[in-house]
Amino acid sequence: MGWLTALLSGLVFGLGLIAGGMANPAKVKAFLDLAGAWDPSLGFVMAGAIAVALPAFALARRRRTAWSGEPMDIPTSTRIDGRLVGGGVLFGVGWGLGGFCPGPALVALATGWWPAAVFVAAMLAGMVLHDRFLAG
Amino acid sequence: MTIAWTSFSPWASLAGGLLIGIACALYLLGNGRIAGIAGILAGPLRALPSRERLRRQRTPLAFIAGLLLAPWLWRVFAPWPVLSVDVGPGALLLAGLLVGIGVRMGNGCTSGHGVCGLSRLSRRSLVNVLAFMGAGFATVFVLRHLAG
């Protein structure tokens, strides 16, 4: 039954992205444009998401397995290095340039919107490129 | 700094955020996993083209299927919002490449490091979030106010 909670999670996640305004690159860019007409809405998306996820993580720490029987797979790495920062910077430049991050781009792609299709094709290529040639 | 009052949508965005939080909680407690889109995509991508290995990626593939179904379910009940981009296909290709490489190198994106990482109080995630937020603010500033 694990696939059912996974499917539902993806569905609710996508609905949240759409409701929150994240699927629209113009709104994302208005959030990133501090010096222009700034739209702080996306800060509210982040605050709402953390308000629910924070207690969920506290709860999950006390469990060994998930409802599906799969083991709890919470990251344990605490390493802060150049790849962590450099990856964040590359991602941020791309995010600011296009206004898409991975989740919203997939949601927008599903509607057949061509800019999302162009972005996602390049993003998947970038991920493969990294994993094949740049993985440390 | 001026606020874009006409497009500011605190309640809709807060509601969207709560839904995203619920989705992360469900994927965490239901499947024991981090709802980070970059990581969820990376597993099945690495498994290609082997069908055998792809079969072991059922959980992330189901999550992606749900994500792709979301706009269709949305449109049953509500009008689809107007989406717009302000750059051409060349810039979108470059943006996609940078995002793809960046989220794999830094091991997460707005969801994995942003929502989930900050929610589990990870210092590593906080560093990554500060890096991508800073770079995002700087990029839009350069594009709109220096180069524009």
Image: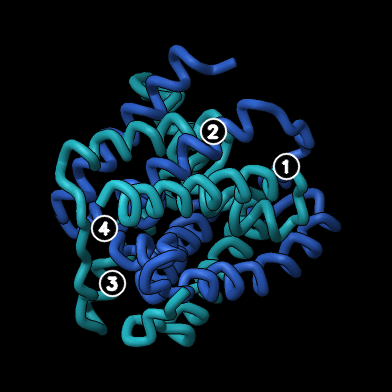
**Other residues around mark 3 within 10 Å, as few (<14) / some (14–19) / many (≥20):** some
Residue pointed to by mark 3: B73
Q: Amino acid at mark 2?
A: Gly
Picture layout, residue A136 above or below residue B10? above
**Other residues around mark 2 within 10 Å, as few (<14) / some (14–19) / many (≥20):** many
Provide the chain ID for the residue under circle 2.
A
Foreground mark, 4 or 1, reads: 1
Q: Which quadrant of the view contains residue A25?
A: bottom left
For the residues marked 2 and 3, what is the alpha-carbon distance in whole angstroms?
34 Å
Q: Amino acid at mark 1?
A: Arg
SS for callout 2: helix
Mark 4 or mark 2, earlier in chain:
2
Foreground mark, 3 or 4, reads: 4
Residue occupying the far right of the picture: A62
Provide the chain ID for the residue under circle 4.
A
Q: Amino acid at mark 3?
A: Leu
Residue pointed to by mark 1: B124
Picture layout, residue B127 above or below residue B21? above
Q: Residue at x 46, y 78 (%)?
A: B13
User: Which chain comes out blue in the rendered image?
Assistant: A
SS for callout 3: helix
Residue pointed to by mark 4: A108
The answer to whether tags 4 and 1 share a subunit is no
Q: Residue at x 43, y 78 (%)?
A: B2
Residue pointed to by mark 2: A87
